[in-house]
Image (tube, rainbow, N blue to C red):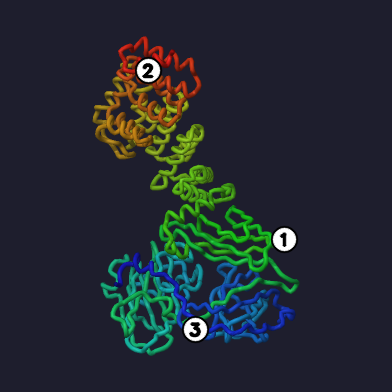
């Protein structure tokens, strides 16, 4: 069924037809003799039996590293056969990076020699290459593609070519050769029609698209539009074609996101299906060998794109690098601040762009430019498995030489894979380098870094996160949140009450009118601080106002608030060891009923959670705060007993004994009194 892009773009399999029987090895021409001294370098090409497309003609295509010495238009490429005869060639792509796509006539499978490195070279014997499929991407210029004439004008106004490379079929879920927005896809290929008759073609795309066969428009979906509708809206056409090879072109201009697909219905078919890779006229694949100069071997390497997060909307790409030729020792600089000494590393690029990769192989060095963008998507591999694999590679990346965006992506991946130390390093480096999102979806990762520091006991670092946000001149709601977060660290975890109170006062004084729930949190906190200073009536007034006043009761949804039976929920979370959820339940309880602070209940409950987490020092402090709020509260005996347990765990026997003695003398009717007596024996 010809349907939506999300389904059809997934059909991206590259099929391989079976080549002819491989001939016995033939003797190559004399490699000791240099074909022409004006060419500085050469490398062997081995035409294999691998085929792209349908039954191939006697032509081959090689993906050739150029070592940065080839003319941008590839005019200096020359291919010689085993007898030294010059073959006809056509350069399909060159200049976008230090790799070229070279087609040449190949009357036999076996060894050929490619010469390059002569900037003064004129054109060589020209090959008329009518096979395969090429994709060119341009930056979108100005124009209105409501008609084919309008599309032609738009193409004329869009001369900036971003890249060009071979592609298996006319289906894309994102731009594999450049930015994901504001571009033009220009496919050019050669269909091998197995029978003559009426062929129907259909297009589906985001924004304007036109399909041409032998230069004539057959199917179109003009104008700026979303992808809904597909063939059901009539974006199809039929043309009579003879058996044989026919030129096909597909152009898709897009603004916000480029995604498209093309289908066909052969005369002997009943439905429209995506055009498969094997429908295009075929050619053999040639593999490059190690390069050499006239003086001898040189450092040389190739690369391939393995997989990426393109379909997930993230510009993360795995690239495999391999030396060409024997390699004893290797040292790689990937151009993004990361290095390696693996012989054939798989490197995870955390952002798209152009990178200069330098390899030092057995003492020789070479640098080549590579263009990195997500190309193939997941290739059938589960998302979580890929994330775990990437995290295993990037967890030790040195952030000092990486960009802020790359550091942030490192934090995201490592956090998903539960490698928290590496996640913290990535997020921290990103923020230090200026990537501090102050709104939107990414802002939650600022909060998450703060939480990781808090939960890891790195309180000064948690304060740093808050100060870093405040130093970026954030909008009032964000500033209020950062100050409340800072107050929490300063008082709850560092016992610096005066500084914490100053943060809450600043929220009320500077951002009191801000539409933020954190202003109410700051107000509730000031009530607790008043209680700590002995002002119980002042504290009661503030907390009752926060609980009952129409001004403070309006919840704006800045954070999730639990509802329902808080006591029951808390006990269940604590029983199951879900400590984070238990803490949220306490916050929800106080948010719903701030006056509970007057009895110290929330501090007692926090102490119980911390004790269960074996964080004994802050647990003991929370029990002290609960007892200070109300020494005769219904849970005072529990608070003393659990504080004694915490002190025992910290090897503070005298402090523990005093807790148990207080239970015995002050709460003789308590169910814990007998246990306390046993403790003091």
Mark yes or no: residue 676 visible: yes
From this view, report whether residue 257 is shown above or below residue 634.
Answer: below
Measure the alpha-carbon separation of dots 1 and 3.
Answer: 41 Å
Measure the alpha-carbon separation of dots 1 and 2.
Answer: 74 Å
Q: Quadrant of residue 229?
A: bottom left
Density class for disc 1 (Cα within 10 Å; few <14, some 14-19, many ≥20) is few
Please tell me which residue lies in front, 562 or 335.
562
Between label 1 and label 2, give the one nearer the viewer. 2
Task: Please name the residue that numbered disc 2 is placed on.
Answer: 675
Between label 2 and label 3, give the one nearer the viewer. 2
Say which label, 1 or 2, has the lower sequence index: 1
Mark yes or no: residue 518 visible: no
From this view, report whether residue 581 is shown above or below residue 228.
Answer: above
Q: Quadrant of the C terminus?
A: top left
Q: Secondary structure at mark 1?
A: loop
Q: Position of residue 173 (x, y in %)?
A: 40, 65
Say which label, 1 or 3, has the lower sequence index: 3
Indicate which disc residue 601 carries: none
Density class for disc 3 (Cα within 10 Å; few <14, some 14-19, many ≥20) is many
Q: Secondary structure at mark 3?
A: strand
Please tell me which residue lies in front, 230 or 436.
230
Q: Position of residue 47 (x, y in %)?
A: 58, 79
From this view, report whether residue 413 is shown above or below residue 156.
Answer: above
Task: Please name the residue that numbered disc 1 is placed on.
Answer: 363
Say which label, 2 or 3, has the lower sequence index: 3
Task: Please name the residue that numbered disc 3 is placed on.
Answer: 56
Q: Position of residue 630 (x, y in %)?
A: 34, 16
Residue shown at the point (39%, 85%) measured from the top left: 193
Judged from this view, the residue extending furthest toward the right is: 295
Please tell me which residue lies in front, 323 or 505.
323
């Amino acid at each position: 069924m010809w349907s939506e892009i999300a389904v059809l773009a997934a059909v991206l399999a590259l099929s391989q037809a079976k080549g002819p029987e491989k001939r016995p090895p033939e003797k190559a021409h004399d490699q000791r003799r240099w074909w022409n001294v004006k060419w500085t370098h050469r490398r062997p090409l081995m035409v294999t039996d691998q085929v792209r497309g349908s039954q191939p003609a006697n032509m081959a295509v090689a993906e050739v590293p150029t070592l940065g010495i080839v003319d941008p238009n590839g005019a200096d490429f020359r291919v010689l056969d085993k007898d030294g005869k010059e073959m006809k060639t056509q350069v399909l792509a060159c200049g976008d990076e230090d790799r070229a796509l070279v087609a040449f006539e190949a009357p036999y499978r076996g060894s050929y020699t490619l010469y390059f490195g002569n900037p003064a070279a004129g054109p060589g014997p020209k090959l008329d290459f009518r096979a395969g499929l090429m994709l060119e991407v341009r930056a979108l210029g100005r124009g209105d593609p409501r008609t084919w004439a309008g599309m032609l004008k738009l193409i004329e106004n869009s001369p900036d070519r971003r890249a060009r490379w071979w592609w298996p079929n006319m289906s894309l879920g994102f731009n594999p050769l450049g930015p994901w927005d504001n571009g033009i896809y220009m496919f050019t290929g050669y269909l091998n029609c197995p029978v003559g008759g009426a062929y129907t073609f259909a297009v589906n795309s985001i924004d304007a698209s036109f399909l041409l066969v032998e230069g004539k428009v057959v199917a179109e979906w003009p104008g700026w539009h979303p992808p809904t509708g597909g063939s059901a809206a009539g974006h199809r056409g039929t043309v009579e074609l003879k058996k044989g090879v026919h030129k096909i072109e597909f152009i898709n201009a897009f603004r916000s996101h480029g995604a498209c697909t093309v289908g066909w219905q052969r005369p002997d078919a009943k439905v429209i299906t995506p055009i498969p890779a094997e429908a295009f006229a075929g050619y053999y694949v040639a593999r490059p060998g190690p390069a050499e100069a006239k003086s001898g071997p040189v450092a040389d390497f190739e690369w391939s794109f393995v997989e990426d997060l393109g379909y997930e909307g993230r510009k993360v790409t795995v690239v495999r690098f391999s030396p060409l030729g024997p390699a004893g020792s290797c040292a790689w600089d990937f151009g993004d601040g990361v290095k390696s000494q693996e012989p054939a590393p798989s490197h995870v690029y955390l952002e798209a762009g152009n990178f200069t990769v330098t390899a030092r192989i057995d003492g020789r060095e070479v640098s080549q430019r590579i263009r990195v963008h997500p190309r193939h998507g997941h290739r059938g591999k589960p998302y979580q498995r890929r994330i775990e694999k990437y995290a295993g590679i990037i967890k030790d990346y040195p952030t000092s030489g990486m960009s802020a965006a790359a550091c942030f992506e490192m934090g995201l991946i490592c956090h998903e894979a539960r490698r928290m130390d590496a996640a913290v390093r990535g997020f921290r480096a990103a923020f230090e380098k200026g990537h501090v999102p102050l709104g939107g979806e990414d802002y939650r990762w600022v909060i998450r870094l703060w939480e990781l520091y808090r939960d890891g006991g790195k309180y000064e670092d948690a304060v740093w996160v808050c100060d870093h946000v405040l130093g970026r001149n954030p909008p009032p709601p964000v500033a209020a949140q950062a100050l409340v977060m800072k107050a929490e660290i300063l008082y709850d975890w560092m016992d610096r009450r005066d500084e914490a109170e100053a943060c809450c006062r600043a929220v009320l004084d500077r951002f009191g009118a801000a539409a933020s729930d954190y202003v109410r949190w700051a107000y509730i906190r000031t009530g607790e601080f008043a209680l700590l200073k002995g002002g119980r009536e002042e504290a009661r007034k503030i907390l009752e106002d926060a609980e009952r006043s129409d001004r403070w009761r309006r919840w704006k949804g800045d954070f999730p608030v639990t509802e329902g039976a808080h006591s029951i929920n808390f006990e269940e979370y604590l029983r199951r060891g879900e400590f984070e959820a238990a803490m949220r339940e306490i916050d929800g309880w106080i948010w719903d009923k701030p006056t509970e602070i007057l009895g110290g209940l929330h501090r007692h409950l926090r102490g119980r959670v911390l004790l269960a987490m074996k964080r004994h020092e802050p647990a003991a402090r929370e029990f002290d705060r609960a007892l200070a709020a109300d020494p005769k509260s219904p849970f005072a005996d529990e608070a003393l007993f659990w504080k004694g347990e915490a002190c025992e765990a910290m090897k503070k026997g005298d402090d523990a004994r005093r807790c148990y003695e207080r239970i015995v003398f002050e709460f003789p009717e308590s169910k814990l009194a007998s246990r306390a007596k046993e403790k003091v024996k």
